[in-house]
Image (cartoon, rainbow, N blue to C red):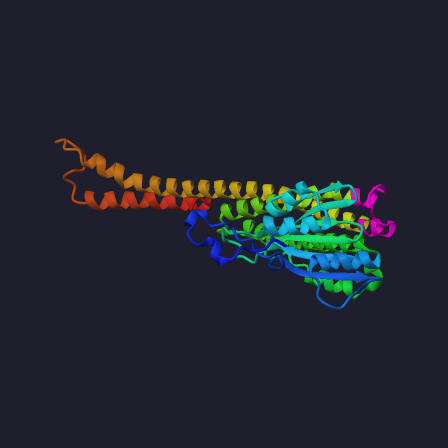
Amino acid sequence: MPQIPPLSSFRGRGKDELPHIPVPTARAIIDCAVYVDGQRLPGRYTHAEALAEVRAKESGFVWVGLHAPDEFQMADVAGTFGLHELAVEDAVHARQRPKLERYDETLFLVLRTVKYVEHDLHSITEIVQTGEIMMFVGRDFVVTVRHGDHTELTGVRRRLEANPQRLALGTGAVLHAIADHVVDSYTEVTQEIEEDVAEMEEEVFTPNSRLAIDAIYQLKREVVELRRAVNPLALPLQLLSKSPELPLPKEIRRYLRDVADHHTAVAERISDFDESLSALINAALAKVTVQQNTDMRKISAWAAMAAVPTMIAGIYGMNFEHMPELKWTFGYGMVWIVILAICTGLLITFRRNKWL
């Protein structure tokens, strides 16, 4: 590991001339373990010590887990395990599409992770958080690089350690377990989204509901984000489960076929959500149009009734000298009777026709 220069070497330098002090690689490593015959060896190892132990025994493999490493930390790990620089660059900068690449005998798999965020149905907020897990899978090592706060793999590691027979299958068992974990999280998120869609459908078709179309648009945007995270994984899973050229045991490929089937089911459900939300937006817009038409009918009905006294008052407000009934004793009362009679007739007619 590179040595950090002593503090005395910094004296006399300007602020912009101070060299970058790298953060030790151990800060980014969450866990590092050696597994032989499905059992975790006791003790603590650095990533270099773990790989040396495995190659000295000529058995087992190393699993190193990192969280959001910087370029220096990732370069240190890459130098130890012989990782390709292009894949290392992707692992540092993240924001990659799900993909599978092969560099000699090392597989590089990118998985997008998702997490459902609890929210109010009427709020405009983030619903699906995304992150990434990158895996470097070799003959005797697995290096996992995580980005995001919800991408922890502690539970996956514990479940594998509780199943030595599966873990004895080698690095492919870790690849399958992580892929299965990620696809299971897709299933959980789609179940939560399905409940949101069902609630929105019920609210949209409930009379006098006030669900904002913006909330539907927000959920549709989040479904698009979910689709971008999930759908591209189909091809990598197909390659992993059906390509005998890849360095994976036959038994692991069988397990991966099951993961691929679950992924296909999730992708189909997400596609259904997209169609349902599009139809829901159209229904909500139609409902708004109907409501606007109803409001216009009401306004028109009240305007028609207001026009009657306005018209009569306008006629008798003209200052002509010779107008009928101007000097009649009961003229004022009769005008009010006529106005009230016409307005009452209009009110009854409008209510009978459900305009009011």
**Horizontal and vertical percent position of residue 63:** 73, 57
Q: Residue at x 25, y 38 (%)?
A: 312
**Horizontal and vertical percent position of residue 274:** 63, 43
Q: Residue at x 73, y 48 (%)?
A: 263
Q: Is residue 80 left or right of residue 307?
A: right
**Horizontal and vertical percent position of residue 94:** 61, 46
Foreground of the two, 175 or 190: 175
Q: Does residue 341 appear in the picture of this structure?
A: yes
Is residue 87 positioned above or below 163 on the image? above
Query: In which quadrant of the rendered view does residue 195 lie?
Result: bottom right
Foreground of the two, 300 or 120: 120
Q: Which residues are magenta?
A: 239-256
Foreground of the two, 152 or 319: 152
Q: Quadrant of the N terminus?
A: bottom right
* Main SS of residues in magenta: helix
Q: Does residue 132 appear in the picture of this structure?
A: no
Q: Is residue 95 left or right of residue 269?
A: left
